[in-house]
Image (cartoon, grey):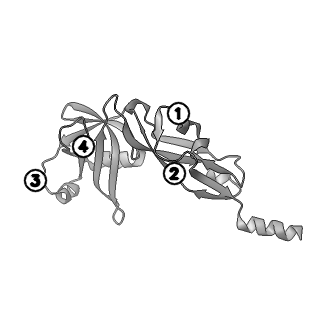
Amino acid sequence: MECISVQRRDVAVKPKKLRRAGVIPAVVFGKAVPESISIQLDEKTARRLIRTKREGSKLELDIEGERIPVQIKEKRLNLLNHEIEHMSFQTLTRGEKVNSVIHIILANDDKISGTLERMLLEIPYASLPRDMIDTITVDLDGIKAGTIITVQDIPELMSDKIELKVDPESIVLRISERKQQKAQQEEAEE
C-alpha cells in the first residue's frame, strides 16, 4: 500500500493562504481517530494522487511518524482554474467494514460497433479493508450491439467478500445499434 507523508495543519492559517503557498488542506476522519485531524500535503503530491487514484482508493498516511491506513473519501476541485481545494481521507480499521465505491473502467470502447450508453460506472459497496476493490476493467472488445451488462454480469462484483449497495440487476452499460446504421439497413432491405 502506498504511503504519503503529510503534516498536521495549523487551523489558524486560512486554506486559501495554504493553497497560494502550494499546500493543500485536508482532513482525516473515522473511528480510528478520536476526532478529525486537520492535515496538509504539498500540491505536487495531491496532484499525483488525483491523477493516479480515485475516491475509494486505499493508501497510508504518515502523519508525523504515525502511519494510518485510509481511503480517499473526497477530492474537491475548482473546475474553473483546476485548483485542488480540499481532500478528505477516511480511516480504515482492520476487521470493520467500510463503505466505498468501485470504479468501472471500460477498455476497448473504441472497438464497439454500436452506441455505448454508460449507466453506472461507480458501484457503491461495503467490505473489510483487506477486500476493498478500487477499479474493475470491463473489456468491450468483441461485444456486439444489443448487449446489456448488469452488475451481476461482472464476476468480481458477485464476490461474497463485498456487500453491494446497489441492485445486482442494475444496468452498468448498454450497447445499442447506431441509428444511422439501422436506417441504412432498413433502406437496403427495401
**Residue under circle 3?**
12
Q: Quadrant location of the C terminus?
A: bottom right
Q: Amino acid at mark 3?
A: Ala
Q: Position of residue 33 (x, y in %)?
A: 21, 37
**Quarter in which the N terminus is drawn:** top left
Instruction: For mark 1, give the secondary structure.
Output: loop
Amino acid of disc 2? Leu
Residue at the location (71% across, 46% down)?
A: 142
Q: Nearer the viewer, residue 109 or 170?
A: 170
Q: Earlier in the sequence, mark 4 or mark 2?
A: 4
Do the residues under discs 3 and 1 have CB atoms within 8 angstroms?
no
**What residue is disc 1 on?**
159
- Give the Cα distance between marks 3 and 4: 17 Å
User: Percent from the top left, x then y, of residue 8?
Assistant: 17, 42
In the rendered image, residue 60, in percent from the top left (x then y), is placed at: 31, 35
Within 10 Å of disc 2 (Cα), the crowding (few <14, some 14-19, many 20+) is: some
Number of marks in picture: 4
